[in-house]
Image (cartoon, rainbow, N blue to C red):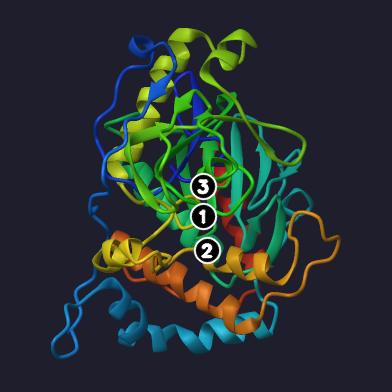
Amino acid sequence: MGDFTVALNPPKTFRADILLSTTNNRTSPAARGFQTVLAFKPPRAFRGIRASVMPREGQQASLGDALVNTPRRSDFVEAIRRTAALSNCLSETSLHATVPGLESKTRGKVRDIYDAGDYLVLVTTDRQSAFDRILASIPFKGQVLNQTSLWWFERTKHIVSNAVVLAPDNNVTIARKCSVFPVEFVARGFVTGSTDTSLWTVYNKGVRNYCGNVIPDGMVKNQKLPKNILTPTTKAADHDVPITPDEIIDRGLMTRADYVEVSEKALSLFEYGQVHTPDSSRYWIANSYLERFQNGLEPENIDKEFLRLWFISHCNPYEDEVLPDAPEDLVCELAWRYIFLYETITKSKFEVPSTEEPIHDRITRNVASALSSLK
């Protein structure tokens, strides 16, 4: 779930970046010949995540009200600002130098991955990535992503088994090694986004056949698709490259049978979850979506898109060699949104970690103990 890099088995697995959607109709890739044709339908309202709050007089309570007015916000503001100001974020790890038995390190956009023989140790850092680069470090983000991913893994085992073995630390998951298909399955429910590979960006440039999906003319940004689709990508040196199902088969990246099975699992996971982790999903406030869409306004969002949009408005994040620093207020706001989403989705309270022990020391101790127990 989410952007978990070594995820599901047996015997091979896939990574699925999940975007908010609710349409449950789908057709087998085998039956449609690896091409999805989408007919235009008027946009419909969709189910979204909501929170119980006391509405202002004459207004309906919404997730936006909860985001701003909940007393939980004040519980975290000071801790978030202190962590950001003191640079206490987990931006980098070096467990291969501190934990016996870890053989090598692979640095992903967000996770540091360590080889531990039959297992992989995945450390979810606070790095915030977009536009194929790191934009900032967000306090507590790594803990939120790791714990949210684990929550979803536990609840989707009936759809497909997964590789999780242990979670010895708030920021760490230990997983069994798997053979991973070199294809990323991105599920989409709306024509939206701001990056080069987002559906709205390519659609706005005139593309109507994207990754094997034929999309009708006349759609506008943030409009709901008639049905959920998959837009697979492969990994280049530092960015994602869109690819069609037929190209996946022709290049030998997957067999036809594997593609059919994995694509159906990806859509099932997407449809089951509706929303997933803040790094891989878009979170829109359901109560205001339709009215704002009909008035040509951006949806009220509670995800990292507002940070992307800030960088787009202040620089060229793809081409500028040096990017401006994200404002502290923006960083703190995103940190709170991650915490808020975790608590809303999981119905669990987020626990701010103790600062008595340096975070890297804590992770070292917990990972060393866990690996020792697995021998």
Q: Nearer the viewer, residue 253 or 99?
A: 253
As measured in the structure, the alpha-carbon distance from the residue carrying label 2 to the one carrying label 3 is 17 Å
User: Label 1: few (<14), some or many (≥20) within 10 Å?
Assistant: many
Vertical arrangement, residue 26 with respect to residue 295, above or below? above
Residue 222 in picture, x, y percent from top left: 41, 53
Residue 355 in sight? no
Q: Earlier in the sequence, mark 2 or mark 3?
A: 3
Q: Earlier in the sequence, mark 3 or mark 1?
A: 3
Circle 1 residue? 279
Q: Is the N terminus in the top left, top right, bottom left or bottom right quadrant?
A: top left
Residue 122 in picture, x, y percent from top left: 59, 46
Left or right, 66 with respect to 219, comes to left
| Residue 304: mark in rendering | 2
- In the rendered image, the residue lying farthest to the right is 321
Answer whether labels 2 and 1 touch (C-beta < 8 Å): yes
Residue 99 in sight? yes
